Amino acid sequence: MLDNLIFLAPPIAACVVLAGILSYFGNHILTRGIIFIDIAIAQVAALGTMIGLLLGFPEESATVQVISYSFTVLIIIFFVMLRSKKMEISQETIIGIIYCVALGVALLLAESIPGGSNYITKTITGNILWVTWKQVLVTSTVVLVVAIIHFFYAKKFIEISEAIRDKKPLQSYRFQELIFFITFGFVIVKAVFIQGIFLVFILLIAPAAIVRLFTQDWKQRFIWSWVIGILGSIIGIYISYDFNISNGPSIVCLLGTFVFIAAFVKAFKKLYAKKHAVQ
């Protein structure tokens, strides 16, 4: 039992850190209605890494990291500029096309890289069971820096998210939006390297969606979505470890099931309240 806990300590620690920051961003992303932006950013970052690998640099080298972050920042600047324009095509449509193109190019590049197909699989499904304490420490440092930045801009970011949700005009918010999405991009790059695109997406959206069914208070949404993300991740890790199955898909399926259960509970509560109101 002790040996199992020692082995699972790094992935559990990584989940606690990443579930917190991803659920925080997830509440903003869900409110803004740009659900698939994280997948697009993650895939563009992975494409940058593929290019670094094609140039002959090791996956975890500083050069590959710089290339990956450069691609991430460029696509984020594009997204921020896009928000200020009136488009005939919806932003979600453009985000989806960018994701597909980035994945398509990455698949083509994978054919020229030894083990390229394995890397593609890893970026999609992740392998959090094999995360190291060094990776946890580096990721925690990035998350801490991002958390400090967002602490000072917290009210402004909430104001922007609510204004975007309500389709209200905002003046002079492009700089804050750039800060929001660049920090978001850095977190996504780190998270995808450990957890994979699918797991990062579900940790962003599922906990935030569950909590939003029951409260609109931002503080409660941040706290409870973090709790749900942590519980889902830890339970999923233990299930995958005990049954010797893939960890990422296990957590994704578990958190996805939580969403449907929460929706059923919400619907039942509404029906119950309506029945008693009539009586």
Image (cartoon, rainbow, N blue to C red):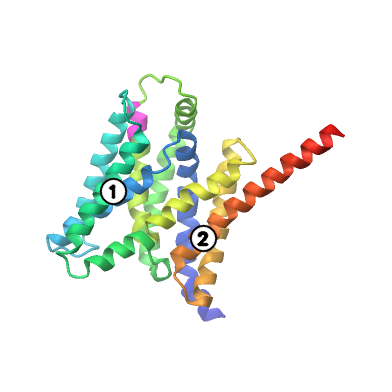
First reached walking from the N terminus: tag 1 or tag 2: 1
State the quadrant of the C terminus: top right
Residue at image location 47% in from the left, 73% down from the top = 245
Q: Answer with left or right where residue 111 lies relative to residue 18.
A: left
Look at the image and give the residue range highlighted in magenta.
174-178
Q: Secondary structure at mark 2?
A: helix
Residue 182, visible in the rendered structure: no
Give the number of the disc on residue 253: 2
Q: Quadrant of residue 269?
A: top right
Residue at image location 54% in from the left, 71% down from the top = 239
Residue at image location 32% in from the left, 23% down from the top = 86
Residue 159 percent location from the top left of the image? 48, 27
Q: Answer with left or right where residue 49 lies relative to residue 184.
A: left
Q: Is residue 88 above or below residue 276?
A: above
Distance CA(mark 1)–CA(mark 2): 23 Å
Q: Main secondary structure of the magenta part?
A: helix
Residue 121, visible in the rendered structure: yes
In front of the other: 53 or 58: 53
Amino acid carrying label 2: it is Cys
Amino acid carrying label 1: it is Cys
Q: Quadrant of residue 220?
A: top right
Q: Are marks 1 and 2 in contact (CB under 8 Å)?
A: no
Q: Quadrant of residue 64?
A: bottom left
Q: Residue furthest left?
A: 55
Q: Answer with left or right where residue 144 lies relative to residue 256.
A: left
Q: Secondary structure at mark 1?
A: helix
In front of the other: 22 or 152: 22
Q: How many marks?
A: 2
In reply to whether residue 90 is colored magenta, the answer given is no
Please give the residue where the numbered disc 1 appears in the rendered image.
Answer: 100
Residue 26 percent location from the top left of the image? 47, 44
Residue 48 percent location from the top left of the image? 21, 52
